[in-house]
Amino acid sequence: MAETVFAKIIRGEIPARIEHDDDLCLAFHDVAPQAPVHVLVIPKRPIESLAGVAADDAALLGHLVVVATQVARRLGLDSGYRLVVNCGPDGGQSVDHLHVHVLGGRRLGWPPG
Ligand code: AMP
């Protein structure tokens, strides 16, 4: 797996606005927010995308979702929010390190583009 910008954020080599940090994952604000709140939750272990997930990643994936809900609550997204995981070129994935987008703070359209 090629090195990504997220690996550098995990190592503290490039700055990020960190919202959550634990042994398994990191949550930080997106550099190009698509909503008033736009946070990314990423595993510290590099998993390229959902396409590379295995059965024994279930607990880690569950942890990412739980942390995403905690971040949403802490940032006041009481009227709702959206979790998005883009996978591969057709899914719109641009960084090849699995990440959960937490989007909120405005009414989000559906369907996505
Ligand atoms: P995706 O298109 O689903 O792969 O999402 C990648 C996200 O990473 C995009 O929303 C980018 O704006 C975001 N991103 C890229 N580089 C950085 C960075 N250095 N710090 C924070 N977010 C970033």
Image: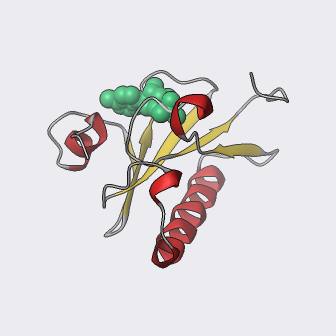
Residue 55: percent from the left, percent from the top?
A: 52, 76
| In this picture, residue 31 sits left or right of residue 113 | left
Q: Is residue 79 above or below residue 68?
A: above
| In front of the other: 2 or 37 | 2
Residue displayed at 45% across by 29% down: 94
Q: In which quarter of the image is ligand 1?
A: top left
The count of marks equals: 0
Q: Is residue 104 above or below residue 57?
A: above
Residue displayed at 25% across by 41% down: 9
The C terminus: image quadrant: top right
Residue displayed at 31% across by 61% down: 45
Residue 10 visible in image: yes
Q: Is residue 95 above or below residue 44?
A: above
| In front of the other: 70 or 7 | 7
Q: In this view, does 28 lie above or below 21?
A: above
Residue displayed at 25% across by 49% down: 10
Residue 30 visible in image: no
Residue 63: percent from the left, percent from the top?
A: 52, 69
Residue 81: percent from the left, percent from the top?
A: 74, 43
| In this picture, residue 66 sits left or right of residue 112 | left
Q: Which color scheme is applied?
A: secondary structure
| In front of the other: 52 or 18 | 52
Q: Quadrant of residue 104?
A: top right
Residue 95: percent from the left, percent from the top?
A: 40, 34
Q: Farthest residue toward the left?
A: 13
